[in-house]
Amino acid sequence: MPIPLEFLYQDVDTTQVIVTSNGQEAICGVDSCNFEYVANSAATLTSFSLSGLTLTIIGTDFPTSDFEVRFGLNPCQISSGTATEIVCILLSPPYAGDYVPKILTLKGQEGSTSGLTPYSVSATISSTSPSTNLKQEGGELLTINGAGFPRDMQEVHALGQLFSVKISDVPCHVETVSATVITCRTHSILDSITSPVLEVSVNGKSVQ
């Protein structure tokens, strides 16, 4: 016969955190559900620079272990780090948007970035194929060449409504995406639109 959960409590003198879902209490992974308050990181970012894929962050009171650096959704591989400077390498260029680096500890603490000027990346369109005479009835595969696009569909899903491809305000269904190429399937366009306008919007940055 199973032992009722209330019989499994133990007497402790530290704060406990109990999580309940649908009336059922979660079981802690250890002997207790101890809660420990940890003050936020004192780390302060005062400046940063990006050269190619190398990100250099200057500041004070940086952690020297058990931390990670992110630039938008991009993880940054730590190359070197001291209490005042961190150098890391991005896995790929950031897509369009405004960014400041984030220093995150394993306990969820985040360094202060107040006062930093964001690094701005724009989306650009260099060419499209076909470039003219799109079929009014739709169903055509459009290839868009440019820069500042998400790297893959996973990033597209992470952006959600912050990413779109439209032709004269009509959505173009995205089939594939990379940092430099988007392919999408067109929908029908009103006959009254004689000069369709392509617009790509990425993370608050739009380009036509």
Image: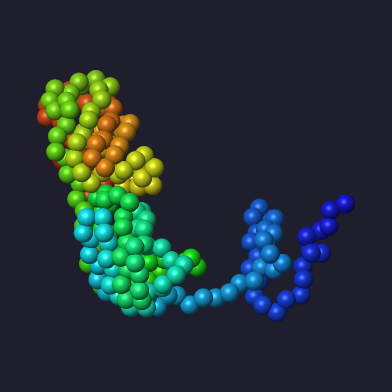
Quadrant of residue 190 within the rendered picture: top left
Residue that extends furthest to the front in the rendered view of this protein: 80
Viewer-side residue, 87 vs 162: 87
Q: Position of residue 34 (x, y in %)?
A: 64, 71
Q: Is residue 96 above or below residue 152?
A: below
Q: Quadrant of residue 136?
A: top left
- Residue 162, position in %: x, y? 31, 47
Q: Residue at x 14, y 38 (%)?
A: 126
- Lateral position of residue 126 relative to residue 76, left or right: left
* Nearer to me, 55 or 113: 55
Q: Residue at x 35, y 70 (%)?
A: 81
Residue at point 25%, 67% (across, down) = 48
Is any part of residue 130 visible from this angle? yes
- In the image, residue 188 above or below residue 5: above
Query: How many labels were placed on the picture?
Result: 0
Q: Is residue 175 left or right of residue 120?
A: right
Query: Percent x, y for residue 151?
Result: 31, 43
Q: Is residue 72 visible?
A: no
Compared across the picture, whether 129 is left or right of 105 comes to left
The quadrant the C terminus occupies is: top left
Image location of residue 192, percent across then percent down: 15, 25
- In the current view of this chain or complex, which residue is farthest to the right? 1
- 35 over 141 or under it: above or below: below
